[in-house]
Image: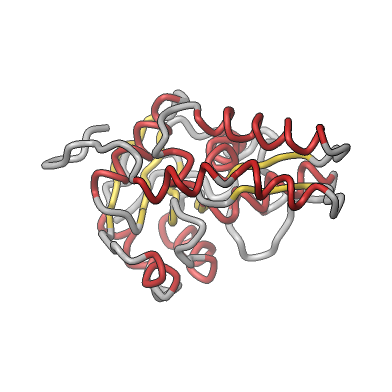
Amino acid sequence: MQLTNTVPVNASPELRAMNAQTGRAALELADARPDVVVTACLVAIMAQGPGYHCTAEDEITAVLRAEGSRAAVVSSAGALLDGIRALGAARVAIVTPYLKPLTQLVADCIEDAGIEVVDALSLEVPDNLAVARLDPADPREHRRRLDLSRADALVLSACVQMPSLPSIQAAQEAAGLPMLSAATATAYRALVELGLPAVVPGAGSLLSGRAGAGGQEGAGPGQP
């Protein structure tokens, strides 16, 4: 998907600087002997280009193993791709809080993984702290601004920082379309890595307990 009137940009210096701290942060966590380590800024990873989530996960794993930790490693970027696949979706629409060029980078990473992005909505909130203060009920209305006619699923928030959990189940039921977010996908992957049931009531199809089992809860043609 190519967003209109945008030119994709390389990762900002701030995002590159964040990624540069990954090894140090993993080292500091290693002696806590966690069972799972999660790197949870989706755009910092996807802005580095398609497939970078694998590089980031491998780098964290290497640091942990060198310190004797056997923790599983999850990135929210990789988890979102895994979550979409677990729903059996080949085409998705996405909502992001990012400026359009960053949304384009996210869409590029999703499409590189073989998943078509049929539509995208950029809320264009430049302040990361303001993203966290967005009303978690708003995504119920955001989905109305997307063309869901060809979508198999909707990523109601492609950003862990952007709250959307109170909206996921209600939006899913209204649209008749499976819903997930970067946050629910990360929770799903962490629960799977822990060997625990990936079930959170009221959190959409991915955490319904039926994802990846050959069915799509709430699947159906999207409605405006």
Position in image of residue 143 (x %, y %): 34, 58
Q: Extreme left residue here?
A: 5
Residue at image point 29% right, 62% down: 126
Compared to 113, does 37 lie above or below? Answer: below
On the picture, is 182 further left or further right than 24? Answer: left
Tell me the quarter of the picture where residue 68 sits: top right
Compared to 183, does 150 lie above or below? Answer: above
Residue at image point 43% right, 28% down: 50
> What count of labels does the image hold?
0
Tell me the quarter of the picture where residue 111 sits: top left
Q: How is the image coloured?
A: secondary structure
Compared to 174, does 20 lie above or below? Answer: above
On the picture, is 41 further left or further right than 6? Answer: right
On the picture, is 82 further left or further right than 219? Answer: right
The residue nearer to you, when weighing 144 against 115, is: 115
Position in image of residue 109 (x %, y %): 41, 32
The residue nearer to you, when weighing 17 against 86, is: 17
Position in image of residue 156 (x %, y %): 43, 55
Position in image of residue 175 (x %, y %): 41, 56
Residue at image point 22% right, 33% down: 2
The residue nearer to you, when weighing 213 against 25, is: 25
Q: Quadrant of the C terminus?
A: bottom left
Q: Quadrant of the N terminus?
A: top left
Residue at image point 53% right, 36% down: 81
The residue nearer to you, when weighing 29 against 5, is: 29
